[in-house]
Image (cartoon, rainbow, N blue to C red):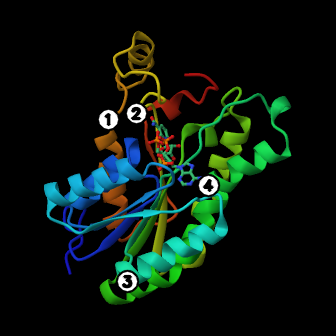
Amino acid sequence: MVVSADNLRDTVALVTGSAHRLGSAIAARLAAAGCDIVVHYGGSRSEAEATALRIRRAHAVQTWALQADLADPASIDRLFEAVAATCGRLDVLVNSASSFVGAPLSEVDASAWDRVQAVNVRAPHLCIRRAAPLLEAAAADRGTAAVINVADLSGVVPWRDFGAHGVSKAGLLHLTRCAALEMAPRVRVNAVVPGAILPPPGETADSAAWRAIGERMPLGRPGRPEDIGDAVAFLAAAQFVTGEILFVDGGEHLFGSTKR
Ligand SMILES: NC(=O)c1ccc[n+]([C@@H]2O[C@H](COP(=O)([O-])OP(=O)(O)OC[C@H]3O[C@@H](n4cnc5c(N)ncnc54)[C@H](OP(=O)(O)O)[C@@H]3O)[C@@H](O)[C@H]2O)c1
């Protein structure tokens, strides 16, 4: 069977947090390769349904919009029960959903700490755990199945005032390696580390501040959501790659500094 980043037909991919922004671009790219798509959402129901409809029309694949609160383990259980019942299989899991909350470590109390870790690192673990039987079955059927975790550079170098977030993303990168080892040889587990792709909600991509961030990158521009979609599609198909951390950041990680 030919499996490539442009031929993922007859597979099902679930992208967490794909109602809009980067998650929806990842979902659209996997659909362009032929995957049927589960658009997972937390609170953005109308955006998720619109994204599912847009992807279905653009790429002639099946789509489903399914809700789960990723901070709630029981909700994650129900999500994967719904995937099994509704889609019948799962070949690709993309853990893209994330909270993005900044605060100096001195202000992060126990409940704030737990909220960040629950969504950014515990939920990807629980999603992988719940997805595992489906992914194993898909691998037995097709020879390959994949998990792709979406981290960021705060998990590699410290960002001031994003300590709890950075620890969660560092944990996600190490979860990637641990799960890759435990799920081999049937299921591959990799991560992408996007750089500056979309400005945070509320800021625009044509602001001077955002353009200046791009100009400081070795490759001289901010990334595009499609850059991340392409990387995820590559990892979904790359059959001899597991436990890999793929930087898709215009070379930003080369600075190794704590600041953009
Ligand atoms: N944007 C960038 O330039 C950039 C750069 C580096 C890394 N990344 C990484 O790429 C991924 C996507 O980035 P993004 O900017 O598109 O993310 P985002 O807009 O900050 O969040 C993505 C989604 O996560 C979902 N989410 C958060 N908490 C949830 C919960 N408790 N239950 C269910 N869903 C929850 C939200 O879904 P609902 O809206 O449905 O509630 C949200 O739409 C993230 O992992 C991020 O760290 C992004």
Query: Badge 4 is on which residue?
Result: 172
Q: Are marks 1 and 2 in contact (CB under 8 Å)?
A: yes
Q: Secondary structure at mark 1?
A: loop
Compute the Cα span from label 3 to label 4.
Answer: 24 Å
Callout 2 amino acid? Ile
> Does ligand 1 reach within 8 Å of label 2's beta carbon?
yes
Query: Badge 3 is on which residue?
Result: 138
Q: Secondary structure at mark 3?
A: helix
Callout 1 amino acid? Arg
Which of the two discs, 4 and 1, labels the residue nearer the N terminus?
4
Callout 4 amino acid? Leu
Pick whichever, 1 or 20, lies toward us.
Answer: 20
Query: Badge 2 is on which residue?
Result: 197
Which of the two discs, 2 and 4, labels the residue nearer the N terminus?
4
Which of the two discs, 3 and 4, labels the residue nearer the N terminus?
3
Q: Secondary structure at mark 4?
A: helix
Quadrant for the N terminus, please.
bottom left
